[in-house]
């Protein structure tokens, strides 16, 4: 029974190369605070926002499957496979942030992207950052194709912090179907050897 099951597994994995597998793409980025803007009737540009000075660094990354292709959704967004972002004393992950835009050039390289804080109860949810009030700390970060930047707004501090972004994207390695086939064949050999009490068996 073990031999039959493992044989079927090996055969199915040998057929698998004909199947197209989605490849995860990971975007890594850093953001540097460049401007603190206040809208408390002063429209003033200052050297810090909510105690964080110009130059404060943040880091982040997000991962999605290349099968998504060009994508725009500023209502519900797309939940990333993985997302981490930390800046100005706050952290986000795939549970409270969304991907809202993706586009690729003719060679398949990622050209534009956008991620946003996911705040369903806010009038300014995805692809939007308020400058006053709000139920939670808000942000969006994006690459427009002409430069990348980001913004963060605290609900109890009028205005926002802006930042410049440097980023890179790369495909993540996933096991090829043939690798799984070899693994299955290895299991088959082990199963046959055990079923014969360790004696050599011709496959």
Image: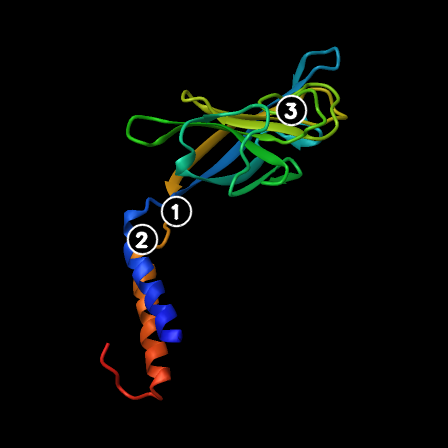
CB within 8 Å, label 1 to label 2: no
Residue at (26%, 83%) from the top-left corner?
201
SS at badge 1: loop
Instruction: Report the Cα–Cα distance between label 1 and label 2.
Output: 20 Å
Residue at (28%, 58%) from the top-left corner?
14
Instruction: Report the Cα–Cα distance between label 2 and label 3.
Output: 42 Å
Question: Which comes before the other along the chain, label 1 or label 2?
Answer: 2
SS at badge 3: loop
Check disc 1: other Cα within 10 Å, few if <14, some if 14-19, many if 20+.
few
CB within 8 Å, label 2 to label 3: no
Check disc 1 and report the residue beneath it.
Answer: 172
Q: Give residue 111's position: percent from left, percent from top.
A: 38, 27
Q: Give residue 174's position: percent from left, percent from top.
A: 37, 51
- Nearest to the eye among marks 2 and 3: give it: 2
Q: Quadrant of the C terminus?
A: bottom left
Residue 16, numbered label: 2
Instruction: Report the Cα–Cα distance between label 3 and label 1.
Output: 30 Å
- Examine the rendering and report whether any part of residue 155 can be seen: yes
The one nearer the camera, 33 or 94, is 94
Colouring convention used in this rendered image of the protein: rainbow
Q: Give residue 194's position: percent from left, percent from top.
A: 37, 83
Check disc 3 and report the residue beneath it.
Answer: 125
């Amino acid at each position: 029974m073990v031999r039959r099951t493992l044989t079927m597994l090996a055969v199915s994995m040998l057929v698998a190369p004909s199947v197209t597998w989605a490849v995860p793409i990971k975007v890594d980025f850093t953001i540097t605070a460049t401007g603190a803007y206040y809208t408390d009737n002063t429209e003033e540009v200052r050297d810090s926002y909510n105690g964080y000075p110009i130059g404060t660094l943040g880091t982040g990354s997000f991962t999605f499957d290349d099968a998504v292709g060009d994508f725009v959704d500023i209502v519900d967004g797309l939940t990333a496979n993985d997302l981490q972002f930390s800046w100005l004393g706050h952290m986000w992950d795939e549970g409270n942030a969304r991907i809202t835009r993706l586009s690729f050039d003719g060679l398949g390289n990622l050209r534009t992207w956008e991620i946003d804080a996911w705040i369903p109860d806010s009038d300014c949810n995805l692809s939007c950052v308020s400058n006053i009030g709000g139920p939670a700390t808000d942000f969006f970060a994006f690459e427009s194709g002409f430069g990348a930047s980001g913004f963060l707004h605290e609900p109890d501090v009028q205005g926002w912090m802006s930042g410049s972004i440097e980023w890179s994207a790369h495909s993540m390695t996933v096991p090829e179907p043939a690798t799984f086939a070899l693994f299955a064949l290895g299991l088959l050999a082990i199963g046959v050897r055990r079923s014969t009490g360790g004696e050599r068996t011709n496959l």
